[in-house]
Image (cartoon, rainbow, N blue to C red):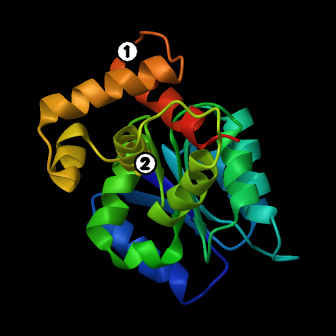
């Protein structure tokens, strides 16, 4: 799996490259700003880009804007966005694209190497993976929506699915059986009006609909 990394920190960038390389990814380019990222994507056509939200020259939203451009120009390229803290506006921008192969993680999550690499694999395979803190913020809003039709347990399952967890991982986290997870997922798909289709896309659509405003 070929990856391009974009992060302007001379301290953080080599560390992420090492984590990805040790995890079986091929880092074909590591750049420090959005302009270099877009050129590198055009040249290498990677499987995935890992991009910081804030990069030069203004250190505001250059990274997320580049990520959204890549989504439009290269829809086959997965996008993993990294952020120092939860920026709900930017997570919303990513979610509003309405397709899979996207992730949004806090940089602290990289220190949990296994979780980070698992999230990368989910995103590259067409799924979605959002940081638990991102999911928690969206969930608070959902729980205060009087029109929400999900039960408390269905919220639990949907939130874990949004983090990119498999059915078995959800079952283990909630201490329920895999068959119970499947029943909850079926209820979630029905209540969120997700039509029957192949498993991966259905999960992605459910996650994006669950998180979307």
Q: Residue at x 49, y 22 (%)?
A: 191
In this rendering, position of residue 30 left or right of residue 186: right
**Dot 1 alpha-carbon crowd within 10 angstroms: few under 14, some 14 to 19, many 20 or more:** few
Residue at far top of view: 196
- Quick one: 86 or 142, which is closer to the camera? 142
Residue at far right of view: 58
Disc sitting over residue 37 in the figure: none
145 up-or-down from 60: above or below? above
Quarter of the image for the C terminus: give it.
top right
- Between disc 2 and disc 1, the foreground one is 2
**Dot 2 alpha-carbon crowd within 10 angstroms: few under 14, some 14 to 19, many 20 or more:** many
> Earlier along the polypeptide chain: callout 2 or callout 1?
2
103 up-or-down from 101: above or below? below
Q: Residue at x 37, y 66 (%)?
A: 20
User: Is residue 172 at all visible to an observer of this figure?
Assistant: yes
Q: Residue at x 50, y 17 (%)?
A: 194
Verify CB contact (< 8 Å) between mark 2 and mark 1: no
Image quarter for residue 11?
Answer: bottom right
SS of the residue under disc 2: helix
In this rendering, position of residue 85 left or right of residue 93: left
In this rendering, position of residue 152 left or right of residue 57: left
Q: Residue at x 37, y 64 (%)?
A: 116
- Quick one: 84 or 86, which is closer to the camera? 86
- Expressed as whole percent of the image width and height from the top left, the position of residue 112 reads 32, 74
- Expressed as whole percent of the image width and height from the top left, the position of residue 5 reads 55, 64
- Quick one: 213 or 80, which is closer to the camera? 213
SS of the residue under disc 1: loop
The residue that mark 2 highlights is 159
Spatial CA distance of label 2 from label 1 is: 20 Å
Disc sitting over residue 198 in the figure: 1
User: Is residue 39 at all visible to an observer of this figure?
Assistant: no
């Amino acid at each position: 799996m070929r990856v391009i990394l974009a992060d302007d920190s001379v301290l953080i960038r080599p560390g992420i490259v090492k984590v990805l390389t040790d995890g079986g990814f091929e880092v074909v380019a590591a750049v420090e700003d959005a302009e270099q990222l877009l050129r590198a994507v055009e040249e290498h056509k990677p499987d995935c880009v890992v991009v910081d939200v804030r990069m030069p020259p203004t250190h505001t939203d250059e990274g997320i804007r580049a990520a959204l451009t890549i989504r439009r120009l290269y829809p086959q390229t997965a996008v993993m966005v990294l952020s120092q803290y939860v920026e709900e506006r930017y997570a919303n921008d990513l979610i509003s694209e309405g397709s899979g192969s996207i992730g949004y993680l806090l940089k602290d999550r990289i220190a949990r190497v296994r979780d980070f690499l698992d999230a990368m694999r989910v995103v590259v395979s067409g799924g979605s993976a959002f940081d638990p803190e991102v999911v928690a913020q969206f969930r608070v809003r959902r729980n205060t929506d009087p029109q929400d039709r999900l039960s408390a347990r269905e919220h639990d399952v949907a939130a874990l699915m949004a983090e990119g967890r498999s059915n078995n991982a959800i079952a283990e986290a909630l201490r329920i059986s895999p068959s119970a997870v499947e029943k909850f997922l079926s209820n979630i798909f029905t209540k969120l009006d997700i039509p029957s289709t192949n498993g991966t896309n259905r999960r992605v659509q459910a996650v994006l609909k669950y998180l979307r405003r």
